[in-house]
Image (cartoon, rainbow, N blue to C red):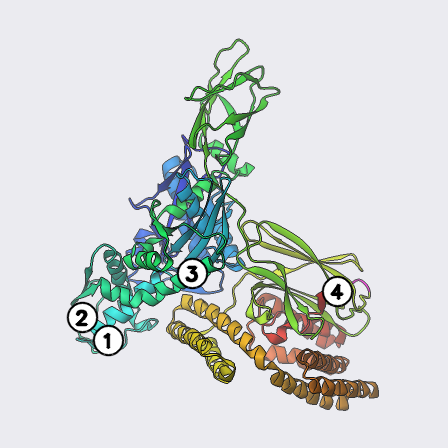
Amino acid sequence: MTGLQQHTIDVGIDLGTTNSSIAVLVDGEPIVLSGMNSPTTPSVVRVRTNGALDVGLVAYQQLEFNPDDVKSEFKTSMGTQQRHLFASSGRQMTSTELSAEVLKVLLGYVGQRFGFAPSAAVITVPAAFDLAQCAATQQAAESAGLRQAPLLQEPVAAALAYGYSVAREQGTWLVYDLGGGTFDLALVGIRDGQISVLDHEGDNHLGGKDIDWLIVEQILVPKLAKHWQVSSFRRGNPARRPQLAVLKAAAETAKIALSVSLSATVTLESGRVLLTDDAGAEIEAEVDVSRQELEAITLPLVNRTIELTRRLIARNHQAPPTEVMLVGGPTLMPLVRERLRDEVGLTLNTRANPLTAVAEGAALYAGAQLLQEAGRARLAQASPADATSHTVTLQHVAVTEDSEAAVGFRSAITDAAVLLVTSAGWESGQVPLASGACFLRVPLLTPGRNEFTLRVLNSVGSDLAITPRTFAIHRGLTASPAPLSHSVGIVVEDEVSGNRVVEWLIHKGNALPATFTFPFRTTRTLDPNGAPEVITIHLVEGESRRPDRNRQVGRLPITSRDVARFIPLGSPLEVSVTISQSRTLGARVFLPSTDQWFDIETQMGSEEVTPSDLTVELLNQQRRLEDALPLLEIDEVVELRKKVEDLAHQVTAASNGDAGTAQQALMSLKELQGSLDTIDERGDLPRSIESARTELASASSVIVAHGSESHVRRLQALADDLTGAIESKDINQVEAVSRHIGRLQFEVLSSHSWFWKEWFEHLRSTQIRWSNKESAEALFRDGERAIQQGDASDLSRITLRLVALAPDDDRSFRDVGIRRG
């Protein structure tokens, strides 16, 4: 335990896609730990037939021989509901559970070295991670036994590792982090000794694994095809998984070799995995791969990172970076360095080890984070003081940008004084331990490590035996609060058009932690004794004003049966949102009229998507693009067709079984939809008119059959309003009238008990991926009882709650019922 503080976290973890690493701050220096004589540990898990687990190198060595029982690259599906099946044991595990096993192994290295199991560690995440992915990472930390696990953005960690040994108080540079499965690009600034992320770009589904697959699919398989029948060697083909695992492992080896050599030879032969072609002929080959071939196939991927780099620099032209710091194994590729140097024109800084910089920076950050009481007690048990010595508890930061620091002392010793000295000749003088405690400020005379010797003198000036005898404070860079990666907003009714739009609550780039309260007003009444009605609060994460183009992260339906008394139209409503520094979300709603609080249920699972869903949406977007061609400039056509082409490749990979690529395709789909939405706005009026006329026709048939004379008169007035809006070509007014027509139709239908029963039965008979399956099943049981008891009021409340659990699409936002206050 020598050199470890007992009141700061000190442990930093880089939980990577392909490899992970852990570092511990010892005497102010980050020390990388490993159990296999390597600075990194493969992020790979194997489950044996008997259910026993192997993690790290042992599991990695089985990856190409037993791919059905070994999983890797599961970080790409963090925050999703995907479950990974281990065939031999039949066990299924989520990406969160697999990540927890990797964390346990990393934490075990600390136990081997220092004799205690850490209860706290700083864990790094990509800057582009969304709330669901951050929540999944924290859940993995908790499952691994960590009581305290602050999250730190990977670019900040890398910048801390770089700036640790640099005497610089001002400056701006880029952190270019191309990892195994993610790409992070951050503009990092130093101001007065403090590091902060000024802006960032990234792609959560772009990294070294994509290069490995390019080598397999565009070099190895085509070369094998010249001599063997290998048409079945397709990613995701279950019959070829073992052989493809062999090829992918060989591709990774070749990629690494080509970073230092102009050519590499891949030896393919049967071993523990029988390599045969489609006709059953055994494959034995030595395939030569040149750096030129590798660079030709990876150039589009690298250019994608260059495009993001240029975009980031362009929008921050007032604070241009002076150099680029490289992080991640793929940055060792000469092509990456050449493109950055030639296309971006910045100096490449290679001072930090690209494989361990993130873990080292995380440890430095951990040294400035206070350990919670439970963790300090655990550390004390791991390093008991000598029976003849007195324990002195210290309170101080491990790292600071200031030239002095505060140090607190606490001990059971009385009638004594504290004395601090340094090798540079500074001495504090004797400071009395009044009531067993004292406080003083110490100078940090030099950048870097400042070590202090602690003495405690009794009343006659003799030294007492104490623990600890020394401590150190590092004078260097610290990290400012992390910015929010994606904006968080609430779905509201637009006051002019009545359309559902997103009102942003906390914007991307806002410093964390953040807590805000926002005023809204209801756009409908809630009467506990009247007709059933619902107001639904939807929280979303993203950047689009269209609700369905974002990820839903919270939902709360408030029905007329939930409120204590009548809530009139236009009543005030307050929404409070809190996001912690580790990007955990909390939200509540307050109704002043009834003095009621409602907790918003956060939904941290990323949207599920199937290859068939993606295929359908790909075709839809292709049709949208063709329809929009008359509205487009030539350069817009080229850009959008490139996006469609990229999405098509991703959908193909997802259809072949690559779950990580499925999430990547979903992100690309939303980006493409957003681009086409902007184009569609140029020609939306005809579609809005057609939709409004369809709504009017539907409402007419319902109201004539089931409504009153009053309803018919109101519908006629709305029809006249629609005619006027169409003649004035006012799209906002057309859409507003259309919504009023829809609400009138719903008012008529909801007044009949048969309507609620039919809607309930429709929901029960329809295949729906509920956002909370357990809640939906409970509501169906409650609905059955309501039908048996003839309780139409309760059935309406239950049906509205079921609707609130339905998947997100345009219709799921129809019961918003609030506007900006």
The mark closer to the camera, 1 or 4, is: 4
> Which residue bears the numbered disc 4?
521
Q: CA distance from mark 4 to mark 2?
A: 70 Å
- N-terminal of the pair, mark 1 or mark 4, is 1
- N-terminal of the pair, mark 4 or mark 3, is 3
* In the rendered image, the vertical position of residue 595 relative to residue 687, given as above or below: above
Looking at numbered disc 2 in the image, what kind of residue is underneath it? Ile
Which class describes the residues within 10 Å of circle 1: few (<14), some (14-19), or many (20+)?
some
Image quadrant in which you'd find residue 217: bottom left
Mark 2–mark 1 contact, CB under 8 Å? yes
Write down the region rendered in magenta: 561-565
Which class describes the residues within 10 Å of circle 2: few (<14), some (14-19), or many (20+)?
some
Q: Residue at x 46, y 18 (%)?
A: 465
Q: CA distance from mark 3 to mark 2?
A: 45 Å
Q: Residue at x 80, y 88 (%)?
A: 712
- N-terminal of the pair, mark 3 or mark 1, is 1
Q: Is residue 411 left or right of residue 724?
A: left
